[in-house]
Image (cartoon, rainbow, N blue to C red):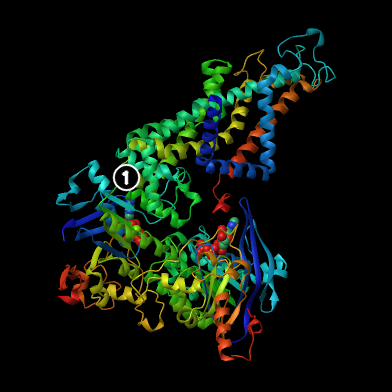
């Protein structure tokens, strides 16, 4: 269980107009082991994408540190080539993540050229063909444009583009949320297969708890830039401790009527990230609020069960 | 369930004439919606859900053409009505539609209150002060906090969930008999989706409207609807009550769809092999046959007929026909020959 | 033997080229299909094609020398010998109009050959690097855009002295800010798109992102815009010639012909009218074509593909 990446009190405040900030990520600490599939779960605007982009140094953090194999990458301005190659990302929307006027060959081949991983044009084509086959597509797509492919095929191209650089660590930012369920199953099975083959570590971002359960081994539940609950996926599923997690579970639409529990319909909307609620971020919508302490004191992340951390005053 | 039929779609066929060829978007769709029910229409991208909805309002977009079929609404064929009649009597009055992106459907330069008030003035012959009063009531009804303030704001100032509620309020203002909701919660978060769906459910039972809910998420349908229609590549492959579809699916596509949905049922996701066909050259016979695990020679040749499984439950699959014939053969061994007469054709 | 091998090689090469470019080929076919479906675009295209043919083959088409004077046959009305009549110096108007097409097209091409690269370069730099580079470029552009285009072009033309070359420079100077602004706006929006972030994640350098990812999209947007502007350029150039700031006699320039012919409008109407028509038709043709190209390049119209 070797640690690959560790975040310490990482924050990202986006400046907005004068003197105002979007507190997209506000003090997150967690660690991910080699070969883990780590889930980041949360609703829109909770800061999942921002956190994922910081992990692979696509954007700078405002404060805090990120240790990648023991090295603090937040202090580096421009990542050295080898590190850049090792950390890759697959984006949520395959319709916007592929250049509309480039052919598949140039889309997948761009990284190979930058990192001088091939010596000749022939080698480039062979390598791309190999990866196209790996993600279940044929050579005939080499000279196609993205608009000629379906959503699932495009996402396969995006996966091939990331994996052809032979990375160690891949952030999957909702890789299936814009795809149909049957295509989603295909892509997830492909991702699982590729992890075995290339010994990859994944961060899997999703807003779908059931999906997280199927693919991840550990999850962190985020709300407004903070982690609410964090631990082994199974233990969180068996016994959700945070009221937010509980509510989230209750409202996911379920196929089987007998599995349905009473829905906990949260009141109101997610508060604005400009000035998030003081104290516990969730107190404005919480159905188990215990009192003033929730409004004033931000609860620390506490290990309540073995390897199961919660940030809630209920467990003080 | 009220047994009165509100909307009946018969053999609806829609083509789009594009550069690549004729997109055969709807391939003879049959559907009945009873008064007062919450009907769900599910299927994957491009299977024709939105085209079905736009055909009901006779709003099929330009290269598209309704080739044949009937759309009976309260026993009257909407396809035989003139555009003027539909505009004056049906669209926005008897039948209204909620879109996936409400902000795009609302007028950006008119404030939220006036949008609803205008709909009331135009459709309900109210005067301005009456309309304004009713607007606030409607906004309250869709659980909007501080309705007076929201009424003065503009659509772009609303969050997705709020905008969808304003849209619902606007649709309800005309007291439609049929409300078509095309992916009303797809762009929303689960917690907001739950709010909107429960609101929709409450309001519908209160206003006694009928809802056609279009979504690609079978779980959403399972939670909210009473009956479901499953579409695949322009065909209606199975219709039944939620329980029948979820617990006793007959069509291989429905079965596959259920297994592909992440749920409590299993830790494995089973994919449906192959991909959605191009509707310019759809597969012959049953459009699902290239992806089906049980394809037989006949599946490639003929379009399967719609067969009754149980009361309310129909499917269009040769596999079901065969298994049923086998069963009936066993039951009446010796007396009964062949299953040709055992076929109950029904929509 | 050798030639057979060469033939086979060529054939293989053609086949593989076809395979690699099948997307472009079908794209081109679709464009042709869409043009055919739009009658107005067809009309525009036809007018422009006629214009181009006139410009290239003028010496073969034109019945007379456009500058040869025949003072004995001044101001002759349209007849079999002179289909559109002759002007005040006895020159054949039809021949002058045919030669004039070349002058008009030359102005359009040269102005765009200056402005497109200039606009793209400045706009790309301003949009991608931002900061003071952006400030300087855009402030200068603002100054140019603060004046009405024709008036600015006239002022520059007057300052530089009347000649065809100076007209082109003057028009080019008034038009570049349009392209620079457009390119800057495109760059700003493309820069934020996910596919550019994806390139960054791969480690692609700024230079490669700019040249291979942003530039191609900018160029096609600007070309669409340029086709819409071609009519304008002809109009402004004609205006300047009319005022005596542009082409000088005896150049067969349409604007100049209208200008010198206007004294004869009442009694010898054909002298200014036919060149006027030529301007009208050319502007009209370019505008129709420009509109058509804009519509055809609209991805919504091509949606049927998916
Ligand atoms: N470049 C940016 N500039 C300003 N604000 C930003 C920027 N990127 C993200 N934000 C804000 O930061 C917050 C978190 O955004 P983020 O994209 O990380 O959320 P998310 O959890 O990925 O949501 P989603 O599920 O919608 O993808 C949001 O409020 C968003 O508006
Ligand atoms: N304007 C159009 N031009 C050409 N083809 C069209 C047009 N509108 C729809 N189609 C085709 O009709 C078919 C059905 O489309 P429709 O929009 O009904 O799908 P849908 O089931 O609503 O999918 P989604 O879940 O993506 O909304 C598709 O194959 C689509 O390509
Ligand atoms: Mg995100
Ligand atoms: Mg749709």
Instruction: Check disc 1 and report the residue beneath it.
Output: C202
Q: Quadrant of residue B315?
A: bottom right
Question: Which image quarter holds the C terminus of chain A?
Answer: bottom left
Q: Residue at x 19, y 77 (%)?
A: A314
Tell me: A200 left or right of B182.
left
Q: Position of residue A210 (x, y in %)?
A: 34, 71
Farthest residue to the right: give it. Answer: C80
Farthest residue to the front: give it. Answer: C1
Q: How many marks?
A: 1
Query: The disc numbered 1 marks a residue on which chain?
Result: C
Q: Using the image, determine if residue B280 lies above or below residue B49.
A: above
Would you call the spot at circle 1 few (<14 residues within 10 Å), some (14-19), or many (20 or more)? many
Q: Position of residue C292 (x, y in %)?
A: 62, 41
Q: Using the image, determine if residue C239 lies above or below residue B14.
A: above
Tell me: A186 left or right of B28.
left
Tell me: A218 left or right of C53.
left
Q: Quadrant of residue C95?
A: top right
Q: Position of residue A283 (x, y in %)?
A: 26, 72
Res. C213 visible in picture = yes
Look at the numbered disc 1 and give the secondary structure of its residue.
helix
Q: Position of residue C296 (x, y in %)?
A: 59, 44
Q: Residue at x 65, y 21 (%)?
A: C56
Between C255 and B73, the residue placed more toward the observer is B73
Q: Using the image, determine if residue B62 lies above or below residue A79.
A: below
């Amino acid at each position: 269980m070797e640690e690959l990446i560790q975040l310490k009190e990482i924050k990202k405040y986006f400046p907005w107009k004068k003197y105002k900030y979007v507190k997209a990520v506000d003090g997150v600490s967690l660690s991910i082991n080699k070969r883990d599939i780590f889930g980041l779960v949360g609703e829109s605007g909770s800061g999942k994408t921002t956190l994922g982009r910081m992990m692979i140094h696509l954007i700078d953090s405002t404060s805090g540190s990120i240790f990648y194999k023991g090295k603090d990458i937040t202090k580096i301005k421009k990542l050295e080539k080898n590190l850049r190659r090792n950390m890759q990302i697959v984006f949520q929307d395959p319709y916007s993540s592929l250049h509309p006027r480039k052919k598949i060959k140039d889309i997948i081949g761009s990284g190979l050229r930058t990192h001088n991983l091939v010596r000749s044009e022939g080698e480039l084509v062979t390598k791309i063909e190999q990866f196209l086959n790996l993600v279940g597509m044929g050579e005939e797509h080499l000279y196609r444009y993205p608009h000629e492919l379906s959503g699932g095929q495009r996402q396969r191209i995006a996966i091939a583009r990331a994996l052809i650089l032979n990375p160690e660590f891949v952030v999957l930012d909702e890789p299936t949320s814009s795809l149909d369920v049957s295509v989603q199953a295909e892509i997830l099975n492909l991702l699982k297969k590729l992890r075995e083959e290339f010994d990859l570590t994944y961060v899997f971002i999703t807003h779908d708890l059931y999906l997280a359960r199927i693919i991840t081994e550990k999850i962190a539940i985020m709300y407004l830039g903070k982690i609410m609950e964090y631990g082994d996926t199974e233990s969180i599923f068996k016994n959700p401790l945070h009221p937010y997690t509980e509510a989230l579970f209750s409202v996911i639409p379920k196929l089987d009527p007998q599995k349905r529990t009473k829905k906990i319909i949260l009141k109101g909307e997610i508060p604005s990230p400009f000035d998030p609620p003081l104290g516990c971020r969730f107190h404005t919508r919480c159905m188990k609020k215990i009192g003033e302490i929730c409004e004033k004191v931000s609860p620390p992340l506490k290990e309540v069960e073995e390897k199961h951390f919660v940030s809630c005053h209920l467990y003080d | 369930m009220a047994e009165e039929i509100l909307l009946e779609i018969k053999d609806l066929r829609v083509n789009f004439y594009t550069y690549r060829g004729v997109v055969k978007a709807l391939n003879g769709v049959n559907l009945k919606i009873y008064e007062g029910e919450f009907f769900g229409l599910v299927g994957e991208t491009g299977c024709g859900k939105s085209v079905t909805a736009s055909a009901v309002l006779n709003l099929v977009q330009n290269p598209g053409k309704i080739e044949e079929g009937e759309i009976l609404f309260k026993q009257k064929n909407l396809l035989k009505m003139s555009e003027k009649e539909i505009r004056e009597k049906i669209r926005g009055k008897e039948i209204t539609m909620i879109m996936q992106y409400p902000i795009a459907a609302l007028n950006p330069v008119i404030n939220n209150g006036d949008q609803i008030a205008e709909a009331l003035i135009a459709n309900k012959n109210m005067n301005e002060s009456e309309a304004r009063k009713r607007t606030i009531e409607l906004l309250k009804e869709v659980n909007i906090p501080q309705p007076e303030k929201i009424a003065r704001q503009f659509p772009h100032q609303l969050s997705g969930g709020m905008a969808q509620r304003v849209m619902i309020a606007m649709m309800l203002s005309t007291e439609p008999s049929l409300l078509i909701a095309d992916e009303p919660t797809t762009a929303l978060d689960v917690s907001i989706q739950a709010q909107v769906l429960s609101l929709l459910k409450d309001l519908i039972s209160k206003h006694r409207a009928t809802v056609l809910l279009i979504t690609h998420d079978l779980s959403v349908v399972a939670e909210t609807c009473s009956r479901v229609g499953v579409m695949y590549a322009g065909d209606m492959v199975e219709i039944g009550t939620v329980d029948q579809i979820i617990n006793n699916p007959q069509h291989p596509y429905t079965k596959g769809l259920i297994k592909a949905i992440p749920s409590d049922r299993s830790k494995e996701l089973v994919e449906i092999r192959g991909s959605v066909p191009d509707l310019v050259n759809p597969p012959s016979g049953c459009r699902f046959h290239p992806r089906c695990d049980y394809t037989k020679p006949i599946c490639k040749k003929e379009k399967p007929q719609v067969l009754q499984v149980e009361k309310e439950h129909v499917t269009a699959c040769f596999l079901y026909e065969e298994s049923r014939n086998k069963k009936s053969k066993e039951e009446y061994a010796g007396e009964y020959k062949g299953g040709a007469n055992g076929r109950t054709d029904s929509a | 033997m050798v030639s057979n091998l060469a033939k086979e090689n060529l054939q293989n090469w053609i086949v593989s080229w076809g395979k690699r470019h099948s997307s472009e080929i079908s794209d081109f076919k679709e464009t042709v299909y869409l043009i055919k479906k739009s009658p107005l675009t067809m009309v525009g295209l036809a007018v422009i094609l006629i214009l181009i043919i006139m410009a290239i083959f003028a010496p073969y088409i034109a019945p007379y020398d456009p500058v040869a004077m025949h003072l004995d046959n001044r101001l002759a009305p349209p007849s079999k010998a002179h289909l559109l009549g002759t002007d005040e110096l006895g020159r054949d108007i039809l021949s002058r109009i045919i030669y004039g097409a070349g002058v008009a097209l030359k102005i359009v091409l040269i102005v765009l050959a200056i402005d497109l690269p200039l606009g793209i370069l400045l706009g790309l730099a301003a949009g991608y690097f931002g900061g003071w580079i952006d400030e300087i470029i855009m402030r200068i552009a603002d100054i140019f855009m603060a004046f009405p285009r024709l008036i600015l072009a006239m002022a520059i033309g007057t300052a530089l002295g009347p000649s065809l070359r100076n007209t082109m420079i003057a028009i080019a100077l008034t038009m570049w800010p349009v392209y620079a602004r457009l390119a800057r706006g495109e760059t700003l929006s493309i820069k934020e798109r996910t596919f550019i972030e994806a390139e960054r994640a791969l480690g692609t350098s700024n230079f490669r992102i700019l040249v291979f990812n942003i530039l191609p999209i900018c160029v096609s947007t600007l070309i669409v815009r340029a086709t819409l502007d071609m009519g304008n350029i002809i109009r402004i150039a004609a205006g300047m010639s009319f005022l005596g700031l542009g082409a000088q006699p005896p150049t067969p320039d349409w604007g100049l012909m209208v200008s010198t012919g206007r004294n004869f409008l009442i009694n010898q109407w054909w002298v200014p009218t036919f060149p006027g028509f030529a301007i009208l038709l050319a502007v009209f043709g370019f505008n129709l074509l420009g509109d058509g190209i804009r519509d055809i390049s609209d991805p919504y119209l091509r949606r049927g593909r998916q």
